């Protein structure tokens, strides 16, 4: 069994630009949770504001989501997530920023997102994110002052996928564009097909279909 520990970070933002309610995408938490748990990791959850984070995209026909939602220990954790600012980053080998449109509002500028990710990365851990979760990467700079994503190959929810979702005008910015502006090399795959990109200790996925694959690559990277 592994003695590794993974921190899954969830959005606390529930308003999708006035269009509808949003939050974290349940499958994008459930699938990594399953991969990490099966690999023997301890899995903890945190959110930006603490407490029960808002949900989006729940699919109870997905057996992994059903298992996640039925797991009493998980639900107990989700009912009372700590604020990310209360987390000791040195307790974790990896931080995984779970997607969902809510992340676009509260991940990019949150100082705890930047500090937790930087600490884990500079302690030889893995920073991971999926779908809109890479909005966390927008605000992460390393000790050198350089943005984490500059010169890195990454995947994230693409401009084409945002357009397909009909939400281009609802989000505060286009994630692919912002990452490219920071000097990231965004690897664009077909809409809503798995696309996982590994660049050293940065592991990212394009969409909900990539959530488990990102976690598998984190496990492989940590060895």
Image: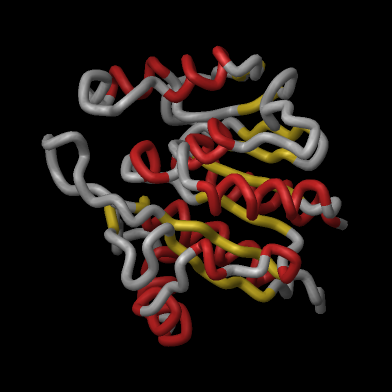
Query: Residue at image x 42%, y 58%?
Result: 48
Identity of the residue drawn at 52% across and 32% down: 206
Residue at position x 63%, y 50% from top? 115
Residue at the (80%, 32%) spot, across then down: 144
Q: Nearer the viewer, residue 32 or 9?
A: 9
Along the line of sight, the residue nearer the viewer: 54 or 145: 145
Tell me how many marks there are: 0
Where residue 153 appears, x then y in whole percent? 70, 23
Q: Is residue 6 left or right of residue 93?
A: left
Quarter of the image where one finds residue 90: bottom right
Reply above or below: 46 against 114. Answer: below
Measured as percent of width and height from the top left, residue 137 is found at 58, 35
Q: Is residue 54 left or right of residue 150?
A: left
Q: Position of residue 105 (x, y in %)?
A: 34, 39
Q: In the depicted view, which residue is nearer to us: 160 or 81?
A: 81
**For residue 200, what is the image quadrant?**
top right
| Quadrant of the rendering where the C terminus is positioned | bottom right
User: Considering depth in this image, is 40 or 153 the residue closer to the camera?
Assistant: 153
Type of colouring = secondary structure
Q: Residue 204 sits in which quadrant?
A: top right
Considering the image in quadrants, where does the N terminus appear? Answer: bottom right
């Amino acid at each position: 069994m592994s003695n590794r520990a993974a921190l899954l970070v969830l959005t606390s933002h529930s308003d999708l630009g006035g269009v509808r309610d949003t939050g974290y995408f349940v499958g994008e938490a459930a699938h990594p949770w399953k991969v990490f748990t099966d690999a023997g990791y301890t899995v903890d959850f945190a959110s930006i504001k603490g407490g029960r984070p808002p949900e989006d995209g729940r699919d109870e026909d997905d057996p992994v989501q059903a298992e996640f939602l039925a797991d009493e220990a998980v639900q107990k954790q989700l009912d009372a997530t700590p604020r990310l600012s209360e987390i000791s980053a040195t307790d974790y080998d990896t931080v995984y920023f779970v997607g969902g449109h809510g992340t676009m509002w509260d991940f990019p500028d949150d100082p705890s997102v930047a500090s937790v990710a930087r600490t884990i990365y500079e302690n030889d851990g893995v920073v991971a994110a999926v779908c809109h979760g890479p909005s966390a990467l927008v605000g992460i700079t390393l000790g050198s002052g350089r943005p984490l994503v500059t010169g890195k190959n990454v995947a994230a929810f693409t401009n084409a996928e945002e357009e397909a979702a009909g939400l281009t005008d609802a989000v505060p910015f286009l994630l692919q564009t912002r990452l490219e502006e920071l000097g990231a090399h965004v690897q664009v795959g077909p809409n809503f097909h798995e696309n996982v990109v590994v660049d050293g200790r940065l592991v990212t996925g394009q969409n909900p279909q990539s959530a488990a694959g990102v976690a598998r690559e984190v496990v492989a990277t940590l060895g």
